Image (cartoon, rainbow, N blue to C red):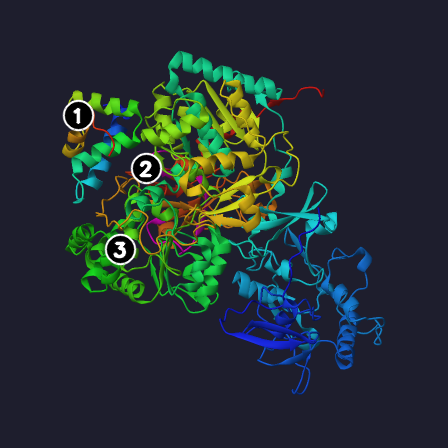
Amino acid sequence: MSSYDGKLVMMANQIARFYLPQKQVEPVAAIATHIRKFWDPRMRAAIIAHVDQGGAGLDEPARQAVERLKQGARPA
Amino acid sequence: MSLVHEIDYGTPVAKSAEQVTLTIDGQKVTVAAGTSIMRAAMDTGIQVPKLCATDSVDAFGSCRLCLVEVQGRAGTPASCTTPVAPGMVVSTQTERLKQIRKGVMELYISDHPLDCLTCAANGDCELQDMAGAVGLRDVRYGYEGENHTKQEKDESNPYFTFDPGKCIVCSRCVRACEEVQGTFALTIQGRGFESKVSAGALNDDFLSSECVSCGACVQACPTATLSEKSLIEIGQPEHSVVTTCAYCGVGCNFKAEMRGEELVRMVPYKDGKANRGHSCVKGRFAWGYANHRERILKPMMRERIDQPWREVSWDEAIGRVASEFKRIQKKHGRLAIGGITSSRCTNEETYLVQKLVRGGFGNNNVDTCARVCHSPTGFGLSSAFGTSAGTQDFDSVEHSDVIIVIGANPTDAHPVFASRMKKRLRAGARLIVIDPRRTDLVKSAHIEADYHLPLRPGTNAAMLNALAHVIVTEGLVNEAFVREFCDRDAFEDWAEFIVQPQNSPENVGLITGVSAEAIRGAARLYATGGNGAIYYGLGVTEHSQGTTAVMGLANLAMVTGNIGRQGVGVNPMRGQNNVQGSCDMGSFPHELTGYRHISDDVMRGTFEAVWGRKLDNEPGLRISNMFDEAIEDRFKGLYVQGEDILQSDPNTAHVVRALASMECVVVQDLFLNETANYAHVFLPGSTFLEKDGTFINAERRINMVRKVMTPKNGKADWEITLDIAHAMGFDMRYEHPSQIMDEIAALTPTFKGVSYALLEREGSVQWPCNEKAPLGTPIMHVGGFVRGKGNFLITEYIATDEKTGPRFPLLLTTGRILSQYNVGAQTRRTENVVWHDQDVLEIHPHDAENRGVRDGDWVRLQSRAGETSLRARITDRVAPGVVYTTFHHPDTQANVITTDYSDWATNCPEYKVTAVQVSPSNGPSDWQREYKDQADRSRRIVKVAAE
């Protein structure tokens, strides 16, 4: 994994770890929304490509959120 | 133009609601109970002669000049210490009073050098004025007797002189140091004729004493005893302009006192609503950088960063910026360039830079230095309360009963507000300090924290959860507040989380290193001690859980009902002067002014209509993302206004690599800063003295910045941005910054009522300022939260990925010092270096001993990111296992050490937690030597012949 991808993976996992225990939102949707709202399109494209190549290092909720991003989720 | 004269009422204002009517010199006057006769007289326009009284300090009654006669009372009471009473009949001028006053003045003048014509205070001396007021024509005692007029001056302070020969021992300086500043550095030494003002111990001078050079004593002095050296050198000012300090987020108002276009001195403005007439060493004295020899006044260019700079015309420089940015976009795509706005620049300038990027560059790659300090505040408080800003005004602290200071060091970083806080603490408010270091607030003159929780760096979220755990499990929840104002479901989910055993003080004590007993005590005090206020700084935000911790603070305030009135609230202490404003102005890549997401089509459409450009609806790159994209060769051009990202951003080697990979870096600044070492175009900036505009301080206060001199570089910063826009084909037209503010107001609901006319009339206002609040909003969330119901968020503690271990066993945390500001570009170019000429590493005696390090030794500081060398200072201010340094000096480059770890929500860097090793060293590291060589080479300038 490149250092660029590694950083994105770390960031996505951090976001996931915050949203996972939240009960007022659906965590995977919230993670996807956060990434959609705050990440530049190139970063989103890179993390989607990373998931397409297996998603090494991504925690499961983060991986699911990226999958949802791929399906074109929009910000809340 | 003339001098702005402020009335000195002699004694402080009384705050009683009860009114008292009396008669003074035949005039009826009604004032608040508790008002002094002196102040009541001044209210009617009668100036009672005075020397030891001034309205910034309590009455003292020593000079015996302000005596009055009161019908039915014996004697001649001092009008400064005698409160008004109903029906009182006062005479301020009688034969008896005239004789007494003349006698008093004779005594003063018999021991005063009669050098008025050559005295620095000539024309602005209260002793001189009083001699005139009492009609002094002769001194019966002569001038030959024993006196104090030949005493040696103390010139040790770089900014002011103490001439005891001119002192009348009125104690105004001593009282100002105690009551206004709260440092207690000065005293009256000796008794009777031997009485003299002393800066501490017998062998102390002002510089070696505990004096913090705030200037309160100088301001209070009625003679030339304490005078600014600039005043002594230049002479009395002839006009003054009220403006706003360009240093920290307190946003003090000053009178810039001028002779022509020469600044004589900066005097704190009594009507300034943020500072109430007080100042610190930076704002009061450290403005010499504006004229520093290293200031760059002409545009410069170079093709490659290994070449020397070449001075060019403005047209050539601006033309190069535009052509390079266009070329890069053509070659690498629309998204390959961006800009960084500055928290040191005005709102209007910041607004224009983000407008240039969005409208002119055609993307949203704009960010601001708030990214690396308070971005978690915006996200955290917005999620909890609905507004990305602090909840109170500064006056609110006067109503606080319990104050939590967490991750902030206000006596160093926000000194003027710290003085107000300390005043309240001396009056009885209780204090909880949560900080790895024993900051001055923990214990200083007449201040002692009830609890100091010296937690391990990186454990804020755990600590805040433990405090909340105690409040919920011990039944200290403000049920009525939560029921009425907060989201019930969110509260119940949060309460279920917070009572879990992992959040108990006993468990969190193991994580934080703080005893469960202290955590429980602090929680109980905050929940039950009355009005509870939270003040926090970058020690909260600059963590991988920075946003989580901000949410934790919001949870604490909500669960105890400490929101929505005076004396309470959650208050971010903003680092730089316009951090709040730069965020408000739409500097973040995902949002436009007023914190509205760029994807909102309707809102974005209003900007498109006014700007005449289609805007991208996708978020742009944050600063750290720009660096990453640059290293990936996808980001090639950057316009940086008023920021030194190379020195201030973490992991310097990473920043260097990113900047070096870009094809056009444009730096707009006062000096060739560290970032400029990697720049291709340098655009000389203007100081805050040279332009009009506004700053917004930590309490959301919009303050005027007023031009007092012509820009030495020829242009205000906003004009430079306009020139770039025009050169890039983006038509932005403004004749004056007021028109920019008009546009901001038209496009931003929270600023809808703001205009320069309103600010001129009111002095300042706090946003939101609109039809619902035409004069602004001092306190937020009164009667309900902006978002509707307060939102409790679950703040699970997650340890940072930055771990200590055998190679890096210590934790480094970084911060600021009083005399220096941020990267030091301004303060290092002033006499403030007398107090701090290098960054040093604070290390606990045990850690030092284990490593064979003695005080003052060079040490090598090494992390996973890099290494540097600096001198050690051995102190138990830091706990064992923790070391601390500042980041003010590029020779040290503290950020060589800090890492890429950042906040989960905002990418705010984790400056406050870096695993390091410290070992003896024999001087600067190879990296430092190489860096200095590169910087020296980069700063070569080829001068052009004068035109």
Task: Decide whether residue B727 is among the magenta residues.
Answer: no
Q: What is the quadrant of residue B452 in the picture?
A: bottom left
Distance Cα–Cα, label 3 vs label 2: 27 Å
Q: Which residue is mark 1?
A: A55
Residue B306 x, y percent position in the rendering: 52, 19
User: Which is more toward the observer, B783 or B110?
Assistant: B783
In which chain is the residue bearing label 1?
A
Q: Earlier in the sequence, mark 3 or mark 2?
A: 3
Quadrant where the C terminus of chain B sits is top right
Percent coordinates x, y for residue B886 in the rendering? 45, 44
Q: Residue furthest front?
A: B771
The verdict on residue B867 being magenta is yes
Mark 3 Cα-neighbour bin, 10 Å: few <14, some 14–19, many ≥20: some
**Residue B751 image position (x, y, % from top left):** 44, 42
Q: Which residues are magenta?
A: B862-882
Q: What count of labels does the image hold?
A: 3
Q: Which residue is mark 3?
A: B485
Give the camera-side residue of B443 and B891: B443
Give the residue type that dot 2 points to.
Answer: Thr
Alpha carbon separation for disc pair 3 and 1: 43 Å
Residue B747 is situated, as x and y percent measured from the top left of the image, at 43, 35
Image quarter for residue B120? Answer: bottom right
The kind of secondary structure element at disc 3 is helix
Report helix, strand or loop for mark 1.
Answer: loop
